[in-house]
Amino acid sequence: MGLIVQKFGGTSVADAVRIHRAARKAIDAKERGNQVVVVVSAMGDTTDDLIDLAKQVCTVGDREIAPPKREMDQLLVTGEQVTIALFAMAICAQGHQAISFTGGQIGLLTDESFSKARIQSINKQKIFKELDAGKIVIVAGFQGVTSDGDYTTLGRGGSNATLVAVGAVLKADVCENYTDVDGIYTADPRIVKNARKIEKISYDEMLELSGLGASVLQTRAVEFAKKYNVPLHVRNSQNDNEGTWIVAETQNMEHIVVSGAALKKDLTRVTVKAVPDRPGIAARIFHSIAAANISVDDIIQNVMDDNTANISFTVEHGDLHDIKPIVEKLVKEFGGTTAAIYQGELAKVSVVGVGMRVHTGVAERMFDALAKAKVNIQNITTSEIKISCIIDKDHGPIALQAVHDAFDLGKARA
Ligand code: ADP
Ligand code: ASP
Ligand code: MG
């Protein structure tokens, strides 16, 4: 007998029929003799719809304010709360016992960073008590509470983080992430038609792919899975096919030079122009941004002739609301001719593979493929196991397909 934690994403619980189908998977696992915990997301596009509603309410005339973060989380946690109750009912309707819990009810405590909270602890006794009583336990993904009892959310795609965190504290034998595709592919199968399902991928490669746009798994969840060595299996909720295993790296993985390609859409470049060129200025800028919990990437500094520098970096479009007031404050503080420019409509195409550590020529092949596809590269960043290029947003899908084909990712491995 083992312990399995399953997670069903929004599409997999989008209506009553799908909830019943997902409930059946949980029951099957239970009938095979396992203890089963299920983490669920909000139904279908509920989270997007709630965000949209908040936007509408926060727009008066042509003035739009950023929704207060605490209230936003208060709103968003309702999505998952609907699913847990319906999911537990579906299991009961199929003749089995189930109980549902919100994040707060299983003591899923987080810090106070609304919208991007970090999990601090989970009360596993409460879950074990119900499992030992023979029930399937349903937990709301994406949410937690602060020590003051305020609701928090864990960032978009945060049910993945709940899955892995619950799996880690319960020492689950496996965490199954049920979604709307058969596993992790060599690129987003909705953009690249000949993308191929990968059997096994290392935590580090998955970490890069998630951060670079493969939103099938949230980056934080993969980080957590790696740290606690949680066995993670990504599968399709609509069939019984074997999916993709995310595992610790093995030596023979280095034979594969590039494992996958990814596209991150909706990036904005922020340029702070004519900042004083002296020690401490970059630290000042990036400290203020990091303090607001915003991640930046692709940093470039160009030193000018007049003792000033231009500092550029990219942020996700969704973070603009938060970053603008910080940048404007810095611009005022630096004074003089310092100014901020925002350039949207950018994307980033990347290739990832642990084999890059030992093989050369990857960058050349990638740049060549982009040139042939007539995609202009605006900036390049690399790490040990990835190469990324900033490009125009409109070129995104063509660029992804071009690099995918340049490394023959669609072809079956020998
Ligand atoms: P869920 O609602 O189950 O959490 P998501 O929509 O968050 O599902 O993630 C699944 C989607 O991730 C897929 O439909 C697919 O379009 C997208 N995706 C992006 N990159 C990849 C990839 N490399 N492999 C598989 N899916 C990917
Ligand atoms: N419902 C949340 C979202 O849409 C969490 C999740 O689905 O993982 O981001
Ligand atoms: Mg998701």
Image (cartoon, grey):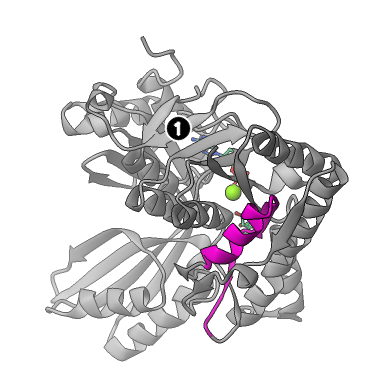
Q: Residue at x 68, y 68 (%)?
A: 76
Taking the image as shown, residue 245 lies to the left or right of residue 153, namely left
Q: Is residue 341 visible?
A: yes
Q: Nearer the viewer, residue 355 or 346?
A: 355
> Measured from the top left, where is residue 377 in percent x and y?
34, 41
Q: Is residue 335 visible?
A: no
Query: Which amino acid is tagged 1?
Result: Trp
Q: Nearer the viewer, residue 351 or 272?
A: 351
* Residue 139 on the magenta segment: yes
Q: Which residues are magenta?
A: 123-147
**Ligand 1 quadrant in view:** top right
State the residue position of label 1: 245
Which quadrant holds residue 132?
A: bottom right
Q: Residue at x 35, y 89 (%)?
A: 332
Q: Residue at x 12, y 79 (%)?
A: 278
Q: Is residue 109 above or below residue 391?
A: below
Which quadrant holds residue 311?
A: bottom left
Q: Residue furthest top?
A: 414
